[in-house]
């Protein structure tokens, strides 16, 4: 998967220290930018991507050819207006779209594979901060993220409080719950149960653990949707047939849809990256990093915060956002919070939503 | 941000006139954020809001105000003591599950508190109940008993007594009949709306 050429690359000029105690040597960050950086460098907005996202927030994906994953929100004249703001979106370390990850080559000239150190959300943000340093940006106008991107935004605000004036966190959480970890574990076990995974050493061979990765994606995809949304979209309708086959083909539309999602995903994502990034999310507990009290994470912050949740999101439900809001209130931070109504569960943050647009636009302003 | 020229409701205008510039304010039940916008624009106040209705919250955030969707009955507990110079509860007390506990919270999170409410002992309300024998529907209380959010009707005298019981000092009070401010004498008869400034 060589997509490095598609993006700008920042070679981190120092070793990147990691929460595990190890360090990444010679790491690089692949990123995209949109708009022009103002002379005083005051108009930069960093957008952090989700688990399987990438830096192509507002430009075509080099592998799938699909439009950017948040193109409806980011672009000229849009809520995050690239005519006014310099928008940066970087691939996180551990991922597979040009930033250093398990598929990258280590100092011995071999792919890291499972030799890649286990990373955390804070480590990803260390990589992003190194990029900001490289670009000479001291303070962002805003850091914005949904889902895992929201975790990064929170981590940046907590650990590098001077680096962002505004922090927008959508459909996210300050810690992974037992249920969140459980679903991720199903995905990881599916990958590792695939014989082609070979202990992670599959880069040189013909086969990769596509079957396991596809199952992982299928399970995860269910958590991104709502029962209501699934029922509305598929119900019990059959796929290209008039009656049940009394077999194990994809009789139901929902089965066919999930299989399609699973196999499509394997075209653009590395199985080991999936292991590492889900692990980082499971390890995320912002309160734990700050003496067990979430309010401590935000003590003395002068940033403005905005949190948005969706009423049908059961992956990171409103209660998780509210928990963060309460901590921010306790820390005396300036915070806005709204729960929006949307039928599509966790994925709602990526879908058209007028109220979401207005809140994002109003807050970024 | 909406221009401050937009006319404030009289109780809000009375409150706005008392809030000192550069202070920190929590507006509980901030609605569309009219008071917050006025305070931020004309008095350089650090205003935060809480509002139950998500559509109103969205409108506030869209105009650049810091407002959280929250319930005054439960979500005040997370604010530290004396986090604000003023805690404002306008036209919301009578909708609270436990107005007495909310008043405690207001006086805990704010150095001073403003409370405004419709006075149930206004002569028009009394007359409607006395002569009509039905729950009053008046210009101050325009919604029928079965769909009103006002679940704890209160009078000027009731509120004074509650404030006393809570050990709060009434620093100042305002009374209104419609848009017009009226004097304190016989306010429990004459006032449609009351505003109190309290400290403890």
Image (cartoon, helix red, strand yellow):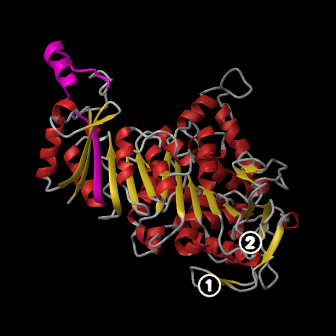
Residue A22's disc is 1
Residue tagged 2: A40
Q: Which of the 4 image quadrants contains residue A83?
A: bottom right
Placement of A253 over or under B92, stated as above or below: above
Q: Is residue B93 visible?
A: yes
**Residues in magenta?**
B110-139
Number of marks drawn? 2
Q: Are marks 2 and 1 in contact (CB under 8 Å)?
A: no
The image quadrant of residue A163 is bottom right
> Marks 2 and 1: which is nearer the front?
2
Q: Is residue A204 visible?
A: no
Q: Position of residue B37 (x, y in %)?
A: 49, 49
Q: Nearer the viewer, residue B7 or A226?
A: B7
Residue at (21% x, 33% y) in the render: B153
Query: For the C terminus of chain A, which image quadrant?
Result: bottom right
Residue at 63% x, 59% y is A144
Location of the N terminus of chain A (image quadrant): bottom right
Classify residue A299 by image quadrant: bottom left
Which residue ends up furthest to the top in the rendered image?
B132
Asked whether A295 or B3 is in front, the reply is B3
- Tell whether B29 sits left or right of A270: left
Q: In the drawing, does residue A359 fall left or right of residue A65?
A: left
């Amino acid at each position: 998967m060589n997509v490095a050429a598609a993006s700008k690359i920042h070679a981190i000029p120092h070793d990147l220290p990691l929460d595990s105690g190890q360090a990444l040597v010679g790491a690089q960050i692949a990123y995209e930018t949109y708009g022009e950086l103002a002379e005083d460098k005051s108009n930069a907005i960093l957008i952090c991507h989700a688990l399987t996202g990438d830096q192509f927030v507002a430009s075509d994906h080099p592998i799938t050819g699909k439009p950017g994953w948040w193109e409806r929100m980011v672009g000229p004249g849009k809520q995050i207006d690239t005519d006014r703001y310099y928008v940066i979106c970087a691939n996180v370390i551990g991922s597979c779209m040009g930033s250093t990850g398990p598929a990258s080559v280590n100092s011995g000239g071999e792919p890291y594979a499972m030799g890649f150190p286990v990373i955390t959300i804070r480590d990803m943000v260390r990589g992003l901060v190194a990029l900001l340093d490289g670009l000479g940006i001291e303070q962002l106008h805003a850091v914005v993220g949904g889902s895992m991107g929201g975790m990064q935004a929170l981590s940046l605000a907590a650990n590098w409080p001077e680096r962002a004036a505004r922090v927008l966190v959508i459909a996210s959480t300050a810690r992974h719950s037992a249920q969140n970890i459980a679903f991720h574990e199903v995905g990881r076990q599916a990958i590792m149960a695939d014989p082609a995974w070979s202990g992670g050493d599959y880069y040189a061979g013909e086969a990769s653990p596509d079957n396991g990765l596809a199952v992982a994606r299928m399970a995860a995809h269910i958590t991104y949707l709502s029962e209501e949304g699934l029922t509305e979209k598929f119900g019990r309708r059959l796929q290209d047939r008039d009656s049940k086959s009394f077999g194990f083909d994809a009789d139901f539309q929902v089965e066919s849809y999930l299989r399609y999602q699973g196999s499509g995903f394997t075209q653009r994502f590395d199985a080991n990256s999936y292991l590492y990034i889900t692990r980082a999310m499971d390890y995320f507990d912002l309160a734990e990093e700050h003496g067990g009290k979430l309010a401590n994470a935000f003590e003395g912050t002068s940033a403005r915060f905005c949190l948005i949740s969706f009423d049908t999101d059961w992956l990171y439900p409103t209660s998780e956002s509210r928990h963060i809001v309460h901590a921010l209130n306790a820390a005396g931070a300036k915070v806005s919070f709204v729960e929006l109504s949307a039928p599509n569960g966790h994925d709602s943050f990526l879908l058209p939503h007028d109220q979401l647009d207005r809140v994002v636009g109003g807050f970024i302003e | 941000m909406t221009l401050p020229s937009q006319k404030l409701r009289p109780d809000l205008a009375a409150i706005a006139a008392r809030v000192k510039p550069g202070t920190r304010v929590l507006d509980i039940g901030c609605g569309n954020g009219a008071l917050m916008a006025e305070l931020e624009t004309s008095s350089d106040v650090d205003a935060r809001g809480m509002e139950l209705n998500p559509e109103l919250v969205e409108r506030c955030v869209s105009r650049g105000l810091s407002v959280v969707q929250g319930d005054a009955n439960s979500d005040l507990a997370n604010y530290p003591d004396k986090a604000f110079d003023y805690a404002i509860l306008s036209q919301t007390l009578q909708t609270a599950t436990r107005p007495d506990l909310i008043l405690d919270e207001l006086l805990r999170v704010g150095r001073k508190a403003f409370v405004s409410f419709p006075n149930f002992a206004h002569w028009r309300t009394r007359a409607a109940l006395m002569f009509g024998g039905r729950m009053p529907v008046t210009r101050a209380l325009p919604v029928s008993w079965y769909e009103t959010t006002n679940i704890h009707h209160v009078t000027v005298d009731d509120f004074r007594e509650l404030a006393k019981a809570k050990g709060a000092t009434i620093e100042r009070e305002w009374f209104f009949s419609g848009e017009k401010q009226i004097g304190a004498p016989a306010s429990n008869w004459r006032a449609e709306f009351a505003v109190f400034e309290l400290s403890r």
